[in-house]
Amino acid sequence: MEVCARSAGKMTKVEGYCESGLDLWVDLKIDSNPENDLDHNDLPQPIASPQGSSTRGQLSDLGSQPILGSNFDTDERGSDLLMSASPDADVSKIKISERASEAMEELLSLALAQDPLWQVDKENNTEMLSDVEYMRMVKVRECQSPPSLDVDNSHELEPLLAVSSESSRAVEYFKTSPISIIELLMDLEQWSLAFSNIVSKATLVGVLASTGVERHYDGTLQLMTAEFHAPSPLVPTRESSFARYCKNLDSGLWGVVDVSPETLPQFPSRNFRRRPSGCLIEEMPNGCSKVIWLEHVVVDNRLVHHFFQPLVTSGFAFCARRWVNILIQHFQWSATVRAPNSPTDRGVIIAQPQRTFFLKFSERMVKSFFMDISASRENKWMPFPVSGADIMISTKSSTDDHGKIPGTTTAFATSVHLPAPSKQVFSLLRDVKFRRQWDIYGRNHRFDERAYISNGDNPENGVSILRAINDETKKLKALYMQESYTASTGSYIVYAPFDYEHAGNELMKDECRDHITILPSGFSILPDRSIHRDETGGSLLTIAFHVVAKSPTDEHEPSNQLGLLMHNIIAKTVMSIKEALGFSDLQSND
């Protein structure tokens, strides 16, 4: 049986899978170098099947061999965490290493398995793991394995009736080497930045095994904590402690697996834990890589807002395809940064340093936006008590934080359901011609796009420089940077305003750009259910504004006057968007 996974909008049959000075004020349009784009119609064929006997033989003893090396390295916090459960820390380390080894073997089995373990939802073009077949596989493995060092299952998520399992698989090809993908996954700073629209925060607790050689990760075992989020304050974050293990499984085949060491008392499972999840990375001809990505988690979704319940409980909100789409976006971004001077359709050439600035500055803007709208504990969201609305407010304070506005700022956000496909909503909010229809701050302004850097195959994905011209004075009022992105798992439009006189002339100076303060606002757009091929159905639109607005009362509690102002802004924006979509008769939170 052929297993299907969406592949950048196309379906390709492979190995039993089918996949589906700032002189800026001239008309510019920058496109990434087409040589850096991977044509999915010309995908290389595998060097060898990853199901070869050498791989199986290499994995046969993983479950019984601890993978701790002599290069053991944990920070003080990691040492305390490992020591907290037992007077003998080595016991904890061995349990974690054995758990990671077993997880790698399970990852390999799940990644290469087909029917009946994986079942295809043809309507939504997704792969779902059969819980019945999975438990049968687990029981068979337990019967064949020696007794575990720890058979205590008391740390499973409770209560069991509230727990659900989410599992998904996606296959994709990348025009980059396996080591580039491995380095991204194993470097905490790179990983958390590249996946900032799903990773709120991450910490490296300790390194339990390592080669000690730069860019050599075979056998590396790390202990990490992370907080995962959906792009709305109405979806609780998922906090997890887990081990991440990297292994060279065979010639040209690598595995990177995450698993929660939930059997250890110092790693309590709150509302979420990771079963073996991660990816197989196979080296392909011409410097390409094939990635099979798996997400397999156990989670309690009871606190998810009813708007997002269908999307989250279906497993779509945190599915493997979402992770893969982010990975695609990252490497397309990297290719655009590295590309030489790129002529546009108007014959204008933009130097690489200028293009690099725009992309890196926009990257910081988008990361800040997703941090601002997530349900992370650091945001301290409070509901504003207005009948018929779910508006959340978070007040933030900053003194001399790098690139942040000093003083007090306030973020306010809401999520609404729209009976329009997400593609239609994205097109409306992205297009500068329609901006004055929904931007209540720009009703008396004309907007135009002065520069555009295309990022990847989709011309709608890129970074824009926008100008706002006052209708009466015909003078430049404001400068905006905007990034837009759309994929099958979601879309966003993020923008940040700049005062032209104070910031506009500094934008292209490398030594100043990281110090330019940024206060992003924007939109996150998700389908209201798992993706359908005809892109029907509605959308879940999250609207977020971040403004300088000091509260006269408590620094973390905005005044009632400020709250009412924010409510009016949100309500008017929602109404304007619905009117532009032709749904003006709907209530704001239908």
Image (cartoon, helix red, strand yellow):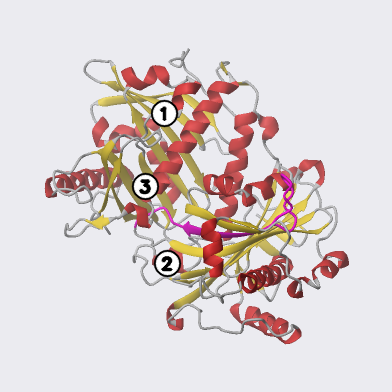
Sequence-wise, the earlier of marks 1 and 3 is: 3
Classify the position of the N terminus by image quarter. bottom right
Which residue type does callout 1 highlight? His
- Of the pair 248 and 220, the residue shown nearer to us: 220
Q: Which residue is mark 1?
A: 515
Q: Residue 60: give x, y in percent of width and height.
A: 81, 73
Query: On the picture, is 51 further left or further right than 302?
Result: right
Mark 2 vs mark 3, foreground winner is 3
- Of the pair 483 and 6, the residue shown nearer to us: 483
229 drawn magenta: yes
For this orientation, the residue located farthest to the right is 53
The residue at the point 46 percent across, 16 percent down is: 24
Q: Which residue is mark 3?
A: 372
State the SS at label 3: helix
**Neighbour tally class for label 1: few under 14, some 14-19, many 20 plus, Cα within 10 Å:** few
- Please give the range of residues in magenta: 209-233
Mark 2 vs mark 1, foreground winner is 1
Residue 247 sits above or below residue 37 on the image: below
157 drawn magenta: no
Q: Residue 18: give x, y in percent of width and height.
A: 70, 58
What's the distance in space between the residues labelled 1 and 3, CA to CA?
19 Å
- The rendered magenta stretch, by its main secondary structure, is classed as loop
